[in-house]
Image: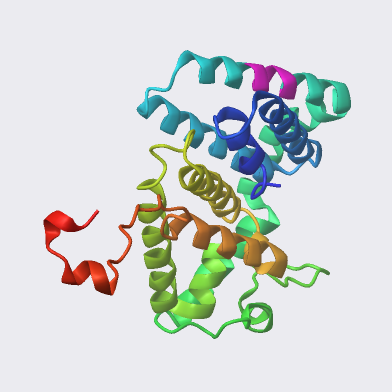
């Protein structure tokens, strides 16, 4: 959902489709955002909030019209109404416990312990890493706490990549993201009226959400998520999909080439 929500959201706030289609897209976006909150995932909530804030920053920098501000407000009202209707007390209690659960995690939770152990693991082979896909095999010898669970992933995609591929592999990842964002942000200026700009906007927002969530979980270790993520990065960074066709002059015939310029009709 983090990857897909920006698609209907961008359509709803753009001028690429008729108004009734934009309203339908806005409702779809609200329902999709609602599923993230109803899932109770703290990382998912943070990710979608970051996506919306990034979108808002881009809108403010582009000095968009009042129409977009009104549409954004209407979307927020629909979303809040949907969450209160479907989530009710369960959603409220889940949000209220986020602070307490975060303190518990920081004071000695399993994820933070895995992160600390992963840093020790990284120090053993910092340059080339242990090898792609080897984290669950190598990690047990660095684990510092007891658990009956099998730790199959690091719950932090960045730390896991750093351990498996070392500084060199991590550097390639950083270079890849820099190229993607630089090319995508260069195309979003006319996102509300241009198909290429709108597509780049939706894709870069979705990619940002999953990258934020990757600090707290291992979403990109799931093949379906990783495949969609790379497809969206490709679309965001690709050259414009639509080019305005240039009117070409018809090639002169053999007879026209033999006539003086003044006699060619």
* Vertical order, 142 against 117 (above or below): below
User: Residue 11's quadrant in the figure?
Assistant: top right
136 or 161, which lies in front? 161
Measuring from the top left, give residue 59's x and y in whole percent: 44, 28
Q: Is the magenta stretch mostly helix, strand or loop?
A: helix
Res 50 visible: yes
148 or 264, which lies in front? 264
Measuring from the top left, give residue 163's x and y in whole percent: 52, 75
Residue in the picture at 46% in, 44% down:
197
In the rendered structure, which segment of residues is drawn in magenta? 74-79
* Vertical order, 20 against 126 (above or below): above
Measuring from the top left, give residue 232's x and y in whole percent: 56, 58
Residue in the picture at 55% in, 52% down:
207
Whether residue 76 is in magenta: the answer is yes
Side of 6 where 32 appears, left or right: right
* Vertical order, 40 against 77 (above or below): below
Measuring from the top left, give residue 4's x and y in whole percent: 67, 47
The mark total stands at 0
151 or 132, which lies in front? 132
Residue in the picture at 17% in, 72% down:
258
Residue in the picture at 61% in, 56% down:
112
Side of 109 where 54 appears, left or right: left
């Amino acid at each position: 959902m983090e990857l897909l929500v920006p698609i209907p959201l961008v359509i709803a706030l753009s001028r690429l489709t008729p108004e009734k289609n934009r309203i339908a897209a806005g409702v779809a976006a609200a329902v999709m955002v609602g599923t993230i909150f109803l899932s109770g995932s703290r990382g998912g909530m943070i990710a979608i909030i970051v996506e919306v804030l990034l979108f808002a920053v881009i809108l403010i920098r582009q000095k968009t019209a009042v129409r977009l501000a009104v549409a954004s407000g209407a979307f927020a009202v629909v979303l809040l109404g949907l969450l209160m209707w479907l989530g009710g007390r369960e959603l409220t209690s889940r949000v209220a416990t986020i602070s307490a659960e975060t303190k518990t995690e920081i004071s000695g939770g399993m994820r933070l312990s895995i992160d600390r152990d992963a840093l020790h693991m990284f120090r053993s082979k910092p340059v080339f890493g242990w090898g792609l896909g080897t984290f669950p095999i190598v990690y047990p010898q660095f684990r510092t706490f007891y658990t009956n669970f099998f730790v199959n992933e690091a719950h932090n995609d960045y730390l896991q990549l750093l351990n498996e591929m070392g500084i060199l592999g991590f550097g390639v990842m950083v270079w890849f993201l820099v190229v993607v964002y630089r090319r995508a942000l260069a195309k979003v200026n006319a996102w509300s009226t241009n198909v290429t700009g709108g597509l780049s906007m939706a894709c870069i927002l979705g990619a940002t959400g999953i990258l934020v969530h990757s600090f707290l979980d291992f979403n990109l270790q799931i093949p379906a998520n990783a495949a969609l993520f790379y497809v969206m990065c490709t679309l965001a960074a690709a050259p414009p999909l639509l080019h305005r066709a240039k009117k070409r002059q018809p090639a002169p015939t053999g007879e026209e080439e033999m006539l003086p310029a003044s006699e060619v009709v």
